[in-house]
Amino acid sequence: MIVIEGVVGVGKSSLMRILGQKGYVEFEEPVVDNPILDKFYHDRQRYSFPLQVFFLNKRFEHIKKAKSVTNAVMDRSIYGDAIFARMLNINDEMSDEEFEIYVELLENMLEHVQRPKLMVYLEISVDEAIKRIKKRGRDYEQIVERAYWEKLNEEYTTYFDNYSLSPILKINVDNIDFENNAEDRVYVMNLIDEKLKELASQ
C-alpha cells in the first residue's frame, strides 16, 4: 500500500490516478460524496467534529479494504488526517472534549490497520498551493482565508518531519507538474520506483 499525503491542492489525486494507470488499485479521498464538507467551510466550528469523524470512518474503511489488495494507492490517509483535527482544536473550532474523543477513536483504529509500505509526502509552498486551489475552482475552498492554508502547511511540515510509522519519500513539487508534463511525471515515478526497490532489497 502506497499512501500519498500533502496539503490541499498539492496533487494527491492526480498522482494516485497516475499510479492507478500503472496497475495500482485506487482508494480515492471521500470528498465528492461528502455531505458535510461544504457546510464545514461555511461554519467550521459547528461541523468540524462530524466532518473529521466522517473522514476517519471512511479512511478506516479504505485502509481495511486496501489490506486485501496486492497493490493499493491511497489519496490521503488515516495518518495525516489527524493534522486537520489538531488544527481545528488549536483554532478553537473543535472543542477540547471533541478533540480528545477524536484522538482516542483514531488510536483505537490505528491498532487494527496495516501500516503503509511507503508514505509519499508531496511538499509545496503556500503560494503555489493557493495558486493550484484557485485553478481547481472548488467554491468552498475559495472562501478560505490565507492564514488557514499557511497554518495547514506548517502543521503538515511538522507532522511529516517527525513521521516514523512507515518509510517515507518526500518530493517537493513547487516546480513540478506531473499531471500535465510527461517529463515531470517520469521523474516522480522514478523516485517512487527507486524507493520501492530500495525497500524491497532491505
Image (cartoon, grey):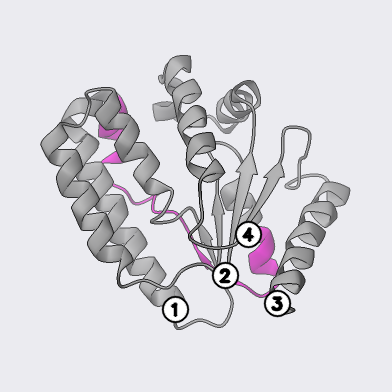
Q: Which residues are magenta?
A: 17-41
> Mark 4 packing: few (<14 Cα in 10 Å), some, or many (20+)?
many
Q: Nearer the viewer, mark 4 or mark 2?
A: 2
Question: Which of the image's four quarters has the N terminus?
Answer: bottom right
- Per the image, the residue denoted by label 4 is 17
Question: Which of the image's four quarters has the C terminus?
Answer: bottom right
**Residue 31, magenta (yes or no):** yes
> Mark 3 packing: few (<14 Cα in 10 Å), some, or many (20+)?
few
Q: Is residue 25 above or below residue 156?
A: below
Residue 35 in sight here = no
Query: Gap between marks 1 and 2, in whole Å?
Result: 11 Å
Q: Is residue 139 above or below residue 1?
A: above
Q: Where is residue 9 drawn, in percent x and y?
A: 56, 36
- Per the image, the residue denoted by label 2 is 117
Is disc 4 in contact with disc 1, using a CB cutoff of under 8 Å? no
Label number found at residue 202: 3
Most foreground residue, 68 or 89: 89
Is disc 3 in contact with disc 1, using a CB cutoff of under 8 Å? no
Label number found at residue 67: 1
Quarter where residue 180 is shown: top right
Amino acid on which disc 3 is placed: Gln
